[in-house]
């Protein structure tokens, strides 16, 4: 943890491109960077508890979507006891100077990282028109798209960067804007 110099928190609605931009960012930043997902300890603990296939839960696709809602409900009960639990557990894998957290969804996630890592944290919001998100597989789902895990940061107004990731923008420009803000 002592060697961490930057923590990039990536937020945005479903299918806005959090994973896509995080991967491009990591490729550009190289070996001193890594991607951490808050959802990883959620998925691994949930898979163990429910005897599910962790690899399928970790990949994109119908299997993940099928269990998304139940996982959110269960993880919220854990967060009620300890809001930083999954952030802290995910960060146990952090061993790089630059840590990209590719799935920040709640104000309490940001609160946790700012409390623990202070000035090292950069909060980044990605946005994308619904029509493009739909082309990427998003379909409004009640119980998923209207609850805190999707909407919790809609009214957050303290982003260090708010960037569009739609089809007209070259993703390299998004990556360059983030890196320019870091250094
Ligand atoms: N700028 C882009 N250009 C082309 N394809 C993109 C772009 N951004 C995202 N995509 C594609 O859109 C799809 C959804 O992106 P991604 O998985 O990164 O979204 P996400 O925000 O991580 O979604 P979720 O919240 O469901 O995990 C992926 O297939 C990805 O490759």
Image (cartoon, rainbow, N blue to C red):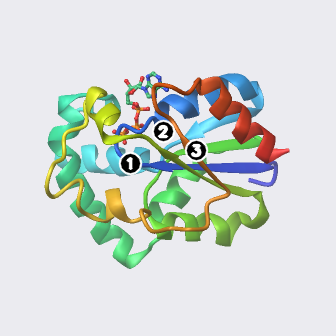
Q: Which residue is mark 3?
A: 163
Name which of mark 2 and mark 1 comes first in the sequence.
1
Confirm whether residue 95 shows in the render. Answer: no
Q: Which residue is mark 1?
A: 13
Q: Is mark 2 within 8 Å of ligand 1?
A: yes
Name which of mark 1 and mark 3 comes first in the sequence.
1
Query: Horizontally, is 83 left or right of 143 in the view?
Result: right
Q: What residue is rendered at 22% in x and 62% in y?
A: 73
Frontmost of labels 1 and 3 is: 3
Which is more toward the observer, 117 or 78? 117
Q: Which residue is mark 2?
A: 18
Q: What residue is rendered at 17% in x and 54% in y?
A: 70
Question: Residue 22 lies in what quarter of the image?
Answer: top right
Q: Is mark 1 within 8 Å of ligand 1?
A: yes
Q: What residue is rendered at 45% in x and 59% in y?
A: 86
- Regarding mark 3 in the picture, which secondary structure is present there? strand
Tell me whether circle 2 and circle 1 mark residues in contact (CB < 8 Å).
Answer: no
Name which of mark 3 and mark 2 comes first in the sequence.
2
Q: CA–CA distance between discs 1 and 3?
A: 12 Å
């Amino acid at each position: 943890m002592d060697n961490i110099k930057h923590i990039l928190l990536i937020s945005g609605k479903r299918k806005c491109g959090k994973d896509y931009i995080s991967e491009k960012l990591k490729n550009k930043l190289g070996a001193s960077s890594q991607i951490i997902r808050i959802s990883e300890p959620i998925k691994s603990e949930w898979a163990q508890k429910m005897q599910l296939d962790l690899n399928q839960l970790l990949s994109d696709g119908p299997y993940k979507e099928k269990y998304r809602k139940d996982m959110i409900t269960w993880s919220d009960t854990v967060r009620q006891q300890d809001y930083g639990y999954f952030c802290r557990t995910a960060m146990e894998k952090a061993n790089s100077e630059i840590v990209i957290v590719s799935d920040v969804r709640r104000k309490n996630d940001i609160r946790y990282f700012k409390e623990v890592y202070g000035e090292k944290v950069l909060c980044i919001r990605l946005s994308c028109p619904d029509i493009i998100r739909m082309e990427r597989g998003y379909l409004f789902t009640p119980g998923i798209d209207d609850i805190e895990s999707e909407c919790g940061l809609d009214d957050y107004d303290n982003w260090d960067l708010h960037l569009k990731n739609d089809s007209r923008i070259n993703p390299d420009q998004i990556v360059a804007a983030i890196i320019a803000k870091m250094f």
